[in-house]
Each structure stands twice: as structure tokens, then as C-alpha cells.
Image (cartoon, rainbow, N blue to C red):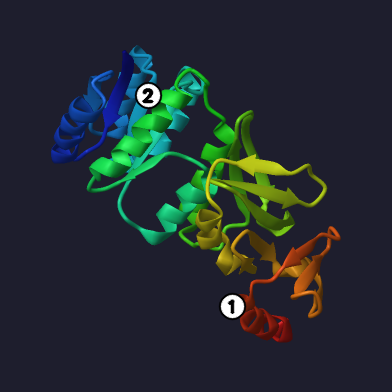
Amino acid sequence: MITAVLIDDDQHLRTGLKALLERYAGDIHIISEAESVKTGVALLEKTQPQVIFLDIHLSDGTGFDILEQLAKTKGKTTAHIVFITAHEQYAVKAFKFSALDFLLKPVDPEELQHTIAKIKEAVGKGNSFEHIDLLLENIRKKVDNFKRIALSTSDGIHLFEVSDIIRCEAKANYTEFFIKNHKPVLISKTLKEYEELLTEHGFERIHQSHLINLSYLKSYIKSDGGYVIMADNTHIPIAQSKKERLQELIKAL
């Protein structure tokens, strides 16, 4: 049995989420609920759940206020946190850049099932508060031009400057990151997911398996089918359908 608490100021959401958990995750048990920062802090001071479902926006503050107040009295929680948020574009991007689990309101059953699988994998491993701090930093900015990204690997969470990422390469359903002055990092997410996050940061998908940071492009070679040479001296093929756009982007650099 996995113990959880639910902190949200929307009674209908709490009722609905509990019903969905009973249907899809009978082994995740909501042991208590709260609806505000004040009651949330009091609840977490007297309980030690393995999972916290935590609303970002509460009537008297934010979910971050709860974590900050709790840290002063009990220290940082070891519970796995699943944030709940409204469908705001900058917030969704902030979560993805921070490699944190979140649920959008209203909660979609399919998304909840994905989150349940992540919870079961993560419970007991503890938290890296660096990426929660990164989320807080990005949420408060209310912009989507994020400078850092958190990458979750089998051995933990790693934070990198987006500008230090040279390129990304698809490895089946995984993505390998090649980062300046760092060994390659393998992430269990598809290249498409990172293409959606990084395109607005100067990255371009030039091949089914390759996403490159145009800032690290050294040469565009037209022979041998066409390829680029990156700053790390790797040769990356260019898909035929991508050549015209890449040439236009190079002219604009």
C-alpha cells in the first residue's frame, strides 16, 4: 500500500481524483486531505505520506509555500510530489523543463495512469529538490524562455544550461544528450518530446534521429547525401526533406 495525501482547494477535484485512484490504483491510498496552505502544512507536520498530490494555486497561497514552510519545521519532505495545475502554457513547459510529475485540471484518466506508473517507480527513492527549485524559478517568471533544463536519468536528476546542449540523438524510445564538457546523458523519453521543448531555443530537427543546437553547427557539407559537422566534430546526416529549411536557417544565422 502506498500512502498519499491530497492538498487542493477544489472539493470536486479532490472527490474526482480519489475516485480515479480507486479505479486505477487501488494500492495508492489517500490517508488525508487539506484545502489550503495552512491546513496543508498542519497535515504534513503530523503525517509522513509517501506521495503528495499538491495543487500549485491554493486560496491562501501556493503549494510551494507549503513545501517552504514545512522545510523550516521538519526539513524537506522525502515524499514523491505530484503537482496539480491549471492548463497554462508557461506552467506546462515549466514542469517539462523541470522533469517533475504533474497533472492538469481536469484530471485525464489516461494521464493519471501514466503518473501512477511513475509514482510506483519513484516511491522510496526520495526527492531532488534542485529540480523543484528549478520549477519554482520557472513558474514565478511566467515566461517560457527557460535557461536550464532538468534531465532525469536512472541515477538521479541532473540540471544543465540549455545553451550547453550540443545535440540530441534518438535511441529507440530514449534520447541521448550530448552536452558541452559533460559525458552523454541517456533519458527515457522520445526525441519528439524534446524537439517540442527545445525548438524555440535554437534547436532544429534535421533528421528522424537528430536534433541539433544551431549555435554549435560548424559546417554544412552538401556531398555524400548532405551532413553537418558539429562543434564536437560529429557528422550528422540531414534528411532530404530538411535540407531546404536548414539552408534557410543557416543564412539567417
Residue 49 % position (x, y): 36, 17
Q: Is residue 196 above or below residue 103?
A: below
Can residue 58 be seen here? The reply is no
Residue 151 % position (x, y): 60, 42
Q: Is residue 42 above or below residue 110?
A: above
Residue 220: quadrant of the picture = bottom right
Query: Closer to the camera, 191 or 132?
Result: 191
Callouts 1 and 2 close, C-beta under 8 Å: no
How many numbered badges does the structure rendering display?
2
Q: Is residue 11 left or right of residue 178?
A: left
Q: Residue at x 65, y 38 (%)?
A: 158
Residue 166: quadrant of the picture = bottom right
Tell me the CA gap for discs 1 and 2.
46 Å
Query: Closer to the camera, 182 or 82?
Result: 182
Q: Is residue 245 above or below residue 36?
A: below
Query: Closer to the camera, 56 or 253?
Result: 253
Residue 131 % position (x, y): 56, 39
Q: Residue at x 73, y 51 (%)?
A: 178
Can residue 120 be seen here? The reply is yes
Q: Amino acid at mark 2?
A: Val
Q: Residues within 10 Å of mark 2 (few under 14, many from 20)?
A: many
Which quarter of the figure is the C terminus placed in? Answer: bottom right
Q: Residue furthest front?
A: 224
Q: Is residue 47 left or right of residue 67?
A: left
User: In the rendered image, which residue does mark 2 sit on?
Assistant: 51
Q: Amino acid at mark 1?
A: Ser
Q: Residue at x 65, y 41 (%)?
A: 186
Q: Secondary structure at mark 2?
A: strand
User: In the rendered image, which residue does mark 1 sit on?
Assistant: 241
Q: Residue at x 68, y 49 (%)?
A: 177
Residue 71 % position (x, y): 49, 24
